[in-house]
Amino acid sequence: MTDAVVVLTTLASEEEAVPFVRMLLDQRLVACGTILPPARSIYRWEGKLADEREVVVLLKTRRDRVEDLQQAFERLHPYQTPELLALPVHAGLVRYLAWINDETTGVLED
């Protein structure tokens, strides 16, 4: 087991996802955000069946950053009820895990 987690979320489009991920990077809440091509989400919302095109975003971060990430989602995510699922990483390349740690520690210097 590592300290790394992958957080899943969705946004309406790549155009919406890019600035969202950049804001999280600027705040050092994530080391990387991978925006996957359009997906189709089918779900029940407010008693009705919804069928929407979205992009899936994989955010790489540390477990101890998830609470701050949740707060950022409340401020920055455009959805009323955004998806935020933090999945534990059981193993990974040591250099990559160290990079996630380094990128989500401290604040950027200007």
Image (cartoon, rainbow, N blue to C red):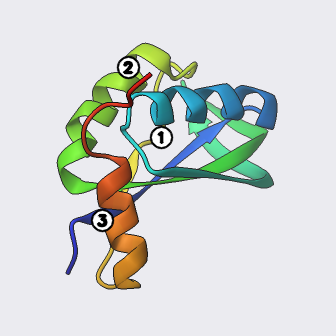
Rate crowding at label 1 as few (under 14), some (14 to 19) or many (20 or more) other CA atoms within 10 Å.
Answer: some
Q: Nearer the viewer, mark 3 or mark 2?
A: 3
Observer-nearest of 31 and 15: 31
**What residue is disc 3 on?**
4
Q: Looking at the rendering, in which quadrant would you find the N terminus?
A: bottom left
The type of residue carrying mark 3 is Ala
Q: Earlier in the sequence, mark 1 or mark 2?
A: 2
Helix, strand or loop under label 3: strand
Residue at 39% x, 28% y is 27
Locate residue 44, reporting x and y percent: 58, 39
> Can residue 32 be spotted in the picture?
yes
* Residue at 38 percent of width and 50 percent of height: 103
Of the numbered discs in the image, which one, if any, rests on residue 83? 1
Residue at the outermost top position: 75
Q: Are marks 1 and 2 in contact (CB under 8 Å)?
A: no
In this view, the mark in front (1 or 3): 3
Q: Amino acid at mark 1?
A: Glu
